[in-house]
Image (tube, rainbow, N blue to C red):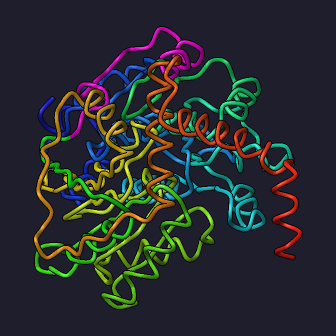
Amino acid sequence: MTNFLDFKFNKQILSAIEDLGYQTPTEIQQKAIPLAMAGHDLFGIAQTGTGKTAAYMLPILMKTKFAQGVNPRALILAPTRELAIQIGEAITELTKYTDLRHTVIYGGSAIKFQIEDIRKGIDILVATPGRLMDIYFREELILKDLKTLVLDEADRMMDMGFMPQIRNLLEIIPKKRQNMLFSATMPERIIKLSEEFLEFPMHVEASPQATTAQTIAQIIYEVPNARTKISLLEHLLQDEAVFTKVIVFTRTKTSANNVFKYISRKIGEDKVRVIHANKDQNARINAMDAFRNENIPVLIATDVVARGIDVSMVSHVINLDVPVIYEEYVHRIGRTGRAGNAGLAITFVNEAEVYHIQKIEKIIKMTIPRQKMPAETILFETEFEEKQTMLMEIDRQHKKEDPTFQGAFHEKKNVIVAKKRIKAPLKNSKKFKQTTKRKK
């Protein structure tokens, strides 16, 4: 299937596809659409940015055809509100010439208005698991007419602890339905989920699991400490002609906020935004819109929103911290190099993160090139506390690989204990007490 006409879509869908400028189906679309339209359960593996949403959405639109009744006939579950909103926007574009109705429900937004939309009648529902079950248990959502269920980014859903809600859902929806599970990675837990969730599934894979797109160049800077990482980031962002549209990923919300405060002082508050789980929905949407519309060149984010950032022409992804959930590396850097465009992913690695990057390289089956830091980067000495933290982390890593490993801190602790034992008798001696009394 090398043309969308080959799929025998109706005129309304073909017109929407043409308006979107889609020329040729992507690999995952070529493989998944015929099987989905034939009614098979699907287990789809593909990198982010390769057209997974259209791969399952176009067959759903052909199946639902037109508005009918008040209860949803297709349900798409997504792990984050950003991804749910992104899927909803794709449905809006693809259904513009039909009368099909859809809505998106997610936490962090007023449940009252979402319930009102459901009451009006919908054909397709996009939801995060938690909010879906909240509305269902309020008896405001009827799922007896469901014909199709999709789990998008299923691995992320499992990482975020949504399996109890998903299992509850499987107990209450019709058993006779089509199921589709899509993910960018295929760890063992996803295989087990597919066995529980899918019936005689057809397996489609657009690329080897957990690989990175060929359009994404990757490099590593070995950076000694946190202050030097910030110095290097500041230096890179000063080249606005090259770093035109940049996403900076951090591991924690605190780190994201700190980086935002520093960088906004250096390059201007009007050029950078930050998004993470503690930001309210309006702040996150406004930040995404500003970045998508190129009103700001820099967006700082945590992994919790990595899957919901669908923005074209992102020039660079910068990993300020190495992710410790290794599949997240693939999702982070997949924000650039999308739709065939070139992109560059840069990762800053300190001494304690070498272990994690080696694990990532094993997963993606490649060695990421190392590059010397620019000479203009200001190098800071590693503070004692940070150095100790890194050494303890390295010890922990060694012990993870070898449970018998004692480590430098174990030896140091023994020395300290021995010194205390030597000093203890002196404190109880008559001479020590007399000296102490004279000083007083």
Q: Who's the residue at 87% across and 59% down the image?
A: 433
Q: Is residue 138 left or right of residue 225?
A: right
Above or below, 41 against 89 in this view is above
Q: Who's the residue at 35% across and 16% down the image?
A: 203
Tell me, yes or no, whether the highlighted magenta stretch contains residue 198: yes
Segment tinted magenta in the rendering: 189-212
Q: Closer to the camera, 165 or 245? A: 245
Q: Closer to the camera, 8 or 330? A: 330
Q: Closer to the camera, 419 or 24? A: 419
Q: Closer to the camera, 242 or 205? A: 242
Which corner quadrant holds the N terminus?
A: top left
Residue 24 % position (x, y): 14, 43
Q: Who's the residue at 47% across and 28% down the image?
A: 181
Figure quadrant of residue 115:
bottom right
Q: Is residue 284 left or right of residue 322?
A: right
Residue 117 % position (x, y): 68, 61
Q: Who's the residue at 33% across and 88% down the image?
A: 266
Figure quadrant of residue 110:
bottom right
Figure quadrant of residue 107:
bottom right
Residue 211 % position (x, y): 25, 33
